[in-house]
Amino acid sequence: MDRLSPGDTAPDFTLTDDTGSEVSLAGLRGRKVIVYFYPAAMTPGCTTQACDFTDSLDSLKGAGYEVLGISPDKPEKLAKFRERDGLTITLLSDPDRSAMTSYGAFGEKKLYGKVVQGVIRSTFVVDEDGKIELAQYNVKATGHVAKLRRDLGLAS
């Protein structure tokens, strides 16, 4: 599994959001995009992370960032997740895990001491030209958005 590094070209993807619309990374060229991968909608850690991104969305957008949250969940489950937790970020469905794989965010990981295949909680910042500015693997769900804001030089 290849991991991405700053300066790499961000792999493009076109995925379906929770309303059934298609969103492509190429369609966001000219804007900075935070792409984050998470294992499953409506689980405690993923809910914390999605709510943190939602709480920070206005200031992130003010600094020029779009936020895309990607999981293997079907659009219907993502719609329930959005509704249940009042999420305002864009939620995308990657059921065949093709985008995750291209970003190195799917593969072997440790879960409760066992090695399993799964989604590796990861966050990427893609610049206006489609290049990776920041690549973070195995991030913690809690406190991640605050750390990311510090890494991007955004006031908390």
Image (cartoon, grey):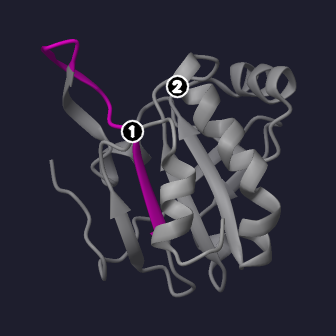
Task: Please say if 13 is above or below 107.
Answer: below
The residue nearer to you, when weighing 62 against 118, is 62
Asked whether residue 12 is drawn in magenta, I would say no
Marked residue nearer the N-terminal end (1 or 2)? 2
Q: Position of residue 64 (x, y in %)?
A: 72, 79
Q: Position of residue 92 (x, y in %)?
A: 64, 41
- Answer with left or right where residue 116 lies relative to residue 150: left
Mark drawn on residue 45 = 2
The residue nearer to you, when weighing 87 against 70, is 87
Is residue 13 at all visible to an observer of this figure?
no
Q: Main secondary structure of the magenta part?
A: strand
Residue visible at 39% across and 74% down in the picture: 132
Mark drawn on residue 121 = 1
In this rendering, the label closer to the viewer, 1 or 2: 2
The residue nearer to you, when weighing 102 against 80, is 80
- Answer with left or right where residue 75 lies relative to residue 9: right
Q: Residue 70 lies in what quarter of the image?
A: top right
Residue visible at 41% across and 77% down in the picture: 133
Q: How many marks?
A: 2
SS for callout 2 = helix
Q: Are marks 1 and 2 in contact (CB under 8 Å)?
A: yes
Residue visible at 79% across and 19% down in the picture: 80
Q: CA distance from mark 1 to mark 2?
A: 10 Å
Q: Position of residue 136 (x, y in %)?
A: 34, 57
- Answer with left or right where residue 152 lies relative to residue 48: left
**Classed neighbour count for the residue bearing mark 1: other residues with Cα under 10 Å, few (<14), some (14–19), many (≥20):** many
* Residue span colored magenta: 111-125
**Classed neighbour count for the residue bearing mark 2: other residues with Cα under 10 Å, few (<14), some (14–19), many (≥20):** some
Task: Please say if 113 is above or below 41.
Answer: above
Task: Name the kind of residue labelled 2 in the image.
Answer: Gly
